[in-house]
Image: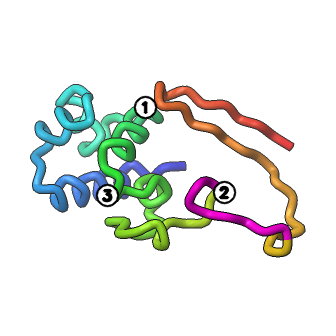
Amino acid sequence: MVNSGKFSERLKKIMDFHGLSSSAFADRIGVQRSSISHIISGRNKPSLDFVLKVTQEFPDVELYWLLNGKGDFPITSLENQPESLPNEHTKVSSSSRSTEEIERIVIFYKDGTFKNFKN
């Protein structure tokens, strides 16, 4: 679960790093200015759509860092990102695979929806 107070601190860190006011940040990610104010004050929790807009607009913001503070900000290269599902940047050989079973896979779409697949 996302800690709203810590989330707002990380949001402020992103704004400070990029030299943006709350209004400019809201305009940049395409949300109402009041949304930023309400999230920073702790009145509202961030929606999935809000989080995705931040990570899409600012590629130096890693999703896990934004949500729970784990990882680094800003991301400087693909090498600093946590391990994830293989894509065009990573290759996994069968010899490096673990014997652990996958419990769940969640796919997030750009429109803010997601699909949850459980084993």
Task: Give the residue at x 72% y 44%.
Answer: 105
Relative placement, left or right, of 34 versus 4 is left
What secondary structure is marked by label 3?
Answer: helix
Task: Give the residue at x 55% y 66%.
Answer: 82
Q: Are marks 3 and 1 in contact (CB under 8 Å)?
A: no
The mark nearer the N terminus, 3 or 2, is 3
Percent x, y of residue 62: 43, 57
Q: Mark on residue 10?
A: 3
Residue 41 is drawn in which quadrant? top left
Amino acid under disc 3: Arg
The mark nearer the N terminus, 3 or 1, is 3
Task: Give the residue at x 48% y 49%.
Answer: 2
Q: Which residue is mark 1?
A: 49
Q: Is residue 118 above or below residue 16?
A: above
Q: Which residue is mark 2?
A: 86
Callout 3: 10 Å neighbours few (<14), some, many (20+)?
A: many
Structure colour scheme: rainbow
How many discs appear? 3
Q: Are marks 3 and 2 in contact (CB under 8 Å)?
A: no
Percent x, y of residue 88: 59, 55
The reply to whether the magenta stretch includes residue 110 is no
Magenta residues?
Answer: 87-94
Q: Is residue 93 above or below residue 7?
A: below
